[in-house]
Amino acid sequence: MIQVEQAKTLAPVIASTTVALYVSYKIIQSLLHDKKKFTKEIPVPGSSLPYVGHMFSLGNMPFETVSQWHKKLGPIIQFHMGVQTWVSIDSPDLAHKVMVTNGSKSSQRNESEFGFNLYSFGGKGIVHSQPNAAWKKARGAVAAAIAPSQIDLHMSSIQNEARKLVDILIDTSDKTKAGIFPFRDLQLYIMNTVTLIGLGKSFPNKDDPKFIELAHTIDEAFKLSGVDFDLASYLPIFIIYDYFKGVRQTFKHFVTEIRDPIFDALIKEAYNAKGPNLVKYLKENNYDLSEEETMVILSDIIGAGTDTNSVYLCWTIGIMCHYPEVQVKIAAEIDNFIEHHGRLPSFSDRLELPFCVSTMKECMRYKPITAFGIPHLANDDIEVDGYIIPKGATIIPNMMSMHKNPEAYPDRPNEFVPERFMNALETSSVASKGKVEERDHFNFGWGRRICPAIHMAEVETFIGFVELMSRCFIEPGEDGMPDINKARNGGISILPSPYKVKFINRKN
Ligand code: HEM
């Protein structure tokens, strides 16, 4: 009897609980269904293999393959690099939403064995570190040390290096009938401007053993940071392979026997160098950085600052050779300035050379410097325009197709149009802080990780280019026009194929 009474009182409770559960289940199901309905699948290119994914479909020129995938599949695509998911974006608007609007979820870096664990002693410095307090301090310190007022202190040394660069280009060109490939000379010029600011020292010429040693160290660091050497991060089975191949030993040897001693000596020298430099600035302003932090910051700066700018100038010279009429216009602007002011234009005079500034920006858009910038990592799911970028995905901007995107560049996106930026002459450093639709180009990256040295890069390249165009015409060498449609894979950067040009003294 008691049991029947209990059943009678429990029946409505059970019934209402069942109804409540059923209703909740239906609501959750419909929410999930709605989410599914409103979540678009990120397209995946077809050529994926089990375990390795798309790794071997990328070919020798991954940026070209990924650009082709974008053409077929749209502005966002997803592919698999072994166990890693990579999401590539080639719409500036979408990239802005992912890396700026969702900056708190998209500003991490991959923790690779070489870059993170060994080269940066577990994520110290700037480039490889996670966006934590130490990264903020290091980035803030460098930003202050290379602020415009600090760069101004080095302006006459930069101009002096530019003069030496052009002297040597004209001189070797005079002596070499076939023409010259100027990459090493450009690398010396840029490295000298970076080491003058960073360490208060420069190298006398490109045959100087210390210059060769440092240039080789940077090249090696770029090479070891590449996918080929870090297979274990993508395909864990390669950990065994790595063990036998001694790849980790190669990494360790490079860091402890090559990078550390070279930078240790350079940093000690910098404390005693005459005049201002970044190493002294960090010490005098009490940033309280450990020796390891200072070492990684300096190798980040010299590594990230040298090849990027030299690659840019090397492309620009190749492009100029194709457009003599553009050279004539730029030369006229510079000559006109000199006639009025009795001196060469400095960076602060750039608005008096609008066509030159516009052309320099267009060269960077037309031939981007890096393939994928420096990849970001999603530390949470990112919902954007109906897509979900999964937590743990590597996020890359595909620089090549992004800079030819007809929505961002409606006027002849695939052509070189030197006057394209005549109405957008502000510095790229200013443009990068504005609205995405007002940015000139995206070579300096995105959001919290954006290149902290845009001003420095613009000053070095402007001074070098103006010095060059004030004194020379660039003509093809004996082998004909540089093939600027051919590129080489430089790991992080996209290099021009070697070419030969002549630097003809305009006074002759
Ligand atoms: C044309 C020249 C340059 C280009 C195209 C360039 C491009 C870039 C790009 C794409 C990034 C990654 C941004 C991102 O993660 O979204 C970056 C980061 C960085 N760049 Fe540059 N850069 C140039 C010159 C320089 C120079 C001259 C220096 C230093 C002297 C420098 C130092 C750095 C550093 C330290 C980072 C890491 C920032 C971070 O992870 O927080 N770069 N740069």
Image: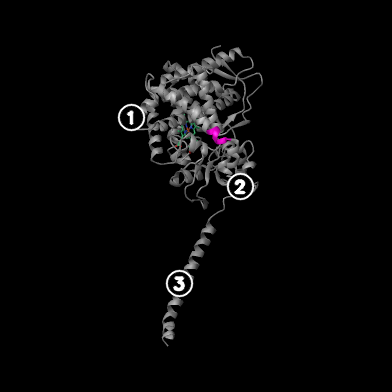
Q: Quadrant of the C terminus?
A: top right
In this view, the mark in front (1 or 2): 1
Residue 73, numbered circle = 2
Residue 401 coordinates in the image, percent (x, y): 58, 39
Q: Tag 1 or tag 3, which sits nearer the N-term?
A: 3
Q: Quadrant of residue 242?
A: top right
Q: Using the image as rendered, state which of residue 182 and residue 239 is in the foreground.
A: 239
List the single residue furthest toward the front: 244
Residue 2 highlighted magenta (yes or no): no
Residue 444 visible somewhere in the drawing: no
Residue 314 coordinates in the image, percent (x, y): 56, 25
Disc 2 from disc 3: Cα separation: 44 Å
Residue 81 coordinates in the image, percent (x, y): 59, 44
* 10 Å crowding of disc 3: few (<14), some (14-19), many (20+): few
Question: Which residue lies at the image location 40% right of the left edge and 23% below the top edge?
Answer: 268
Disc 1 from disc 2: Cα separation: 51 Å
Q: Is residue 51 left or right of residue 342?
A: right
| First to last magenta residue range | 246-251
* 10 Å crowding of disc 2: few (<14), some (14-19), many (20+): some
Residue topped by disc 1: 285
Type of the residue with mark 1: Asn
Check whether the beta carbons of the residues at disc 3 and disc 1 lie within 8 A of each other.
no
Question: Which residue lies at the image location 53% right of the left edge and 15% below the top edge?
Answer: 168
Residue topped by disc 3: 20
Q: Secondary structure at mark 1?
A: loop
